């Protein structure tokens, strides 16, 4: 563990600046403030020093770094060619939050560019960054100073939290102004291309360059195996420990959705928090993208301090710097976006033998609800020739596919439910696909004008799809009642019935997680029990 020195930036403190410069010249790594986010800097000409950055961050080896210069005269030492358009951009936006990708110069080692023949260069405007580059006397390669995968640091404390004992020094220069990383634009191909939105907006780039192509990865998830133009855009990123879900739609519907939710927090706009009944962090006013950029990473880090399981984020505008905010939030959310202006989704679950299916039927007939059956989706996605089926065969053996290419469900069940580990493996293959299919179906019902959908599934809680429901209902019955029901219904032996019950959550878990609990056994009256769902629905839309 390295000893980390802490400096406070003072423009007049030339002694400290000289000390930081010497650490960098000697091959050390230093957390430095910039106007975007804090960087973890090393001498860009020193491959060994740069390698330490990757180690300290746990950064994937194929994700190149940005080289920081303090004067345009340094540009010639890091690139092999300066296109006219680069001069035009530099004139307008340097120093500032813009990184320009150009053909790499010979002095830049592979450790910086990760073997690419291009390099990203930026001239930061923060006086501390400029003074430190000058004091070092060399360009500095610097990624954001967070542990790989975590939100980028926008205060010295964030850097201390992630890099204490890993960096040789940290310079405290206060809170970063912009708050999201620089815009990355490539001038290395025929057409200028925006690889990462940031402090300089697309509109600002286009005012100098004319048309700029926006890389697909800016707003969409890469398909498996698809190559990222900017390697940093392919990783799950900026993630707090809580699962982040973006809720698109009006504040009214957002409020309705999160109402009464447990173990979660809201990332909302200024003035909205007080109207909610869950803990919240405000991230700037609704139409002020710069304010949101300034606060977003700090908010993501504060979620961890709150220790909640789920965070529901309001969806920002995409204009100006907003494109950078939504780009970061999408990655923090692993691209989970739910449209709360759509149909209300009621999750219905219950252990085997609880009578969930008959209650579902009763509810749909009585209240004209749309019905989404997760069992049915599970059958659809495992149809002959489906990608999920081949994944299952790989995990549980080719013989689970019959000669006619259909799935032998009984054989799969016997293997998958044999241990907790294999059950988890089955779930990790099927649950994400079922979740996205179920959401797509719910969207279709929105178009048809339905007001509520019953999302009926045995694994609503295990798959965590409950976090995407307006509220959840669990149908319950004591274990002995359930056991005799399934033995009779499916002509099972006691052992088989017990095995099936054992593969599911215990009854207490359903009770703990659900918003409404239906007691489906004597002496309870089912009509009265169902009334609880109506009450919950009415409370929600109030
Ligand atoms: O604002 C910023 O840019 C901050 C501060 C410290 O300057 N730095 C920063 O660095 O955000 P980092 O490493 O977290 O992000 C660099 C991004 C990554 O997405 C990387 O893949 C991309 O720039 N990048 C760097 N060189 C590249 C190249 N030659 N071609 C394509 N993408 C490149
Ligand atoms: Mg980064």
Image (cartoon, helix red, strand yellow):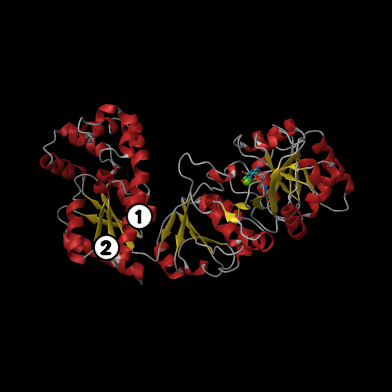
- State which tag comes first along the sequence, 1 or 2: 1
Give the number of the mark in front: 1 or 2. 1
In front of the other: 461 or 204: 204
Q: Position of residue 254 (x, y in %)?
A: 44, 65
Q: Residue at x 87, y 50 (%)?
A: 13
Q: Which residue is mark 2?
A: 533
Q: As drawn, is 60 to the left or to the right of 120?
A: left
In front of the other: 398 or 14: 398
In front of the other: 284 or 321: 321
Q: Residue at x 75, y 60 (%)?
A: 92
Q: State the mark number for residue 439.
A: 1
Element type at marker 2? helix
Q: Quadrant of residue 471?
A: bottom left
- Asked if the residue at label 2 sits under 8 Å from ligand 2, the reply is no
The quadrant of the image that shows the N terminus is top right
Q: State the mark number for residue 358.
A: none
Element type at marker 1? helix
Q: Quadrant of residue 198?
A: bottom right
Q: Report the residue that reaches farthest toward the front.
A: 190
Q: Is residue 166 visible?
A: no
The quadrant of the image that shows the C terminus is bottom left
Q: As drawn, is 6 to the left or to the right of 335?
A: right
Q: Quadrant of residue 212?
A: bottom right
Q: Position of residue 207 (x, y in %)?
A: 67, 64
State how far apart marks 1 and 2 are (Cα): 21 Å
Instruction: Please say if 241 is above or below 52.
Output: below
Mark 1 nearby-residue class (10 Å; few <14, some 14–19, many ≥20): some
Q: Is residue 206 visible?
A: yes
Q: Position of residue 430 (x, y in %)?
A: 33, 41
Q: Report the residue that reaches farthest toward the bottom.
A: 542
């Amino acid at each position: 563990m390295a000893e980390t020195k802490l400096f406070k930036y003072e423009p007049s403190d030339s002694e400290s600046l000289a000390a930081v410069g010497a650490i960098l010249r000697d091959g050390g790594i230093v957390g430095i403030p910039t106007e975007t986010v804090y960087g973890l800097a090393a001498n860009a000409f020193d491959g060994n020093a740069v390698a330490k950055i990757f180690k300290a961050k746990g950064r994937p080896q194929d994700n190149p770094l940005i080289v920081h210069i303090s004067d345009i005269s340094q540009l010639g030492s890091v690139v092999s060619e300066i296109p006219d358009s680069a001069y035009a951009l530099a004139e307008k936006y340097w120093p500032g939050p813009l990184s320009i990708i150009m053909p790499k110069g010979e002095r830049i080692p592979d450790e910086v560019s990760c073997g690419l023949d291009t390099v990203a260069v930026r001239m930061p405007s923060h006086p501390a960054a400029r003074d430190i580059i000058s004091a070092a006397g060399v360009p500095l390669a610097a990624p954001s100073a967070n542990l790989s995968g975590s939100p980028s640091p926008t205060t010295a404390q964030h850097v201390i939290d992630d890099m204490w004992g890993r960096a040789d020094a940290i310079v405290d220069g206060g809170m970063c102004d912009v708050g999201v990383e620089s815009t990355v634009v490539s001038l290395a191909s025929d057409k200028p291309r925006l690889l990462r939105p940031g402090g300089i907006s697309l509109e600002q780039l286009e005012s100098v360059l004319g048309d700029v192509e926006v890389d697909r990865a800016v707003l969409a998830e890469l398909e498996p195996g698809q190559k990222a133009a900017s390697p940093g855009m392919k990783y799950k990123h900026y993630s707090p420990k809580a699962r982040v879900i973006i809720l698109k739609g009006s504040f009214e519907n957002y409020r309705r959705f999160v109402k009464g939710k447990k173990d979660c927090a809201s990332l909302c706009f200024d003035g909205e928090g007080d109207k909610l009944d869950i803990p919240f962090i405000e991230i700037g006013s609704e139409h002020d993208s710069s304010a949101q950029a300034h606060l977003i990473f700090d908010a993501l880090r504060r979620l961890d301090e709150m220790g909640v399981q789920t965070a529901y984020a309001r969806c920002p505008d995409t204009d100006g710097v907003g494109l950078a905010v939504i780009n970061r939030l999408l990655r923090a959310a692993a691209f989970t976006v739910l449209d709360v202006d759509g149909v209300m989704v009621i999750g219905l679950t219950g252990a085997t033998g609880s009578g969930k299916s008959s209650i579902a039927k009763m509810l749909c007939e009585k209240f004209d609800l749309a019905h989404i059956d997760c069992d049915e989706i599970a059958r659809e996605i495992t149809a002959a020739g489906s990608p999920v089926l081949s994944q299952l065969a790989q995990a549980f053996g080719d013989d689970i596919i019959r000669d006619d290419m259909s799935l032998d469900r009984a054989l799969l069940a016997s293997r998958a439910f044999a241990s907790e580990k294999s059950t988890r493996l089955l779930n990790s293959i099927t649950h994400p696909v079922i979740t996205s299919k179920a959401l797509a179906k719910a969207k279709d019902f929105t178009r048809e004008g339905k007001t509520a959908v019953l999302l009926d599934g045995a694994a609503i809680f295990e798959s965590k799809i409950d976090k995407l429901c307006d509220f959840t209902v669990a149908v319950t019955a004591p274990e002995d009642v359930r056991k005799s029901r399934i033995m009779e219904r499916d002509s099972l032996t006691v052992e088989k019935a017990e095995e099936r019950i054992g593969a599911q959550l215990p009854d207490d878990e359903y009770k703990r997680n659900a918003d409404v609990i239906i007691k489906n056994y004597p002496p309870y009256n089912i009509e009265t029990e169902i009334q609880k769902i109506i009450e919950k629905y009415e409370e929600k839309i109030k």
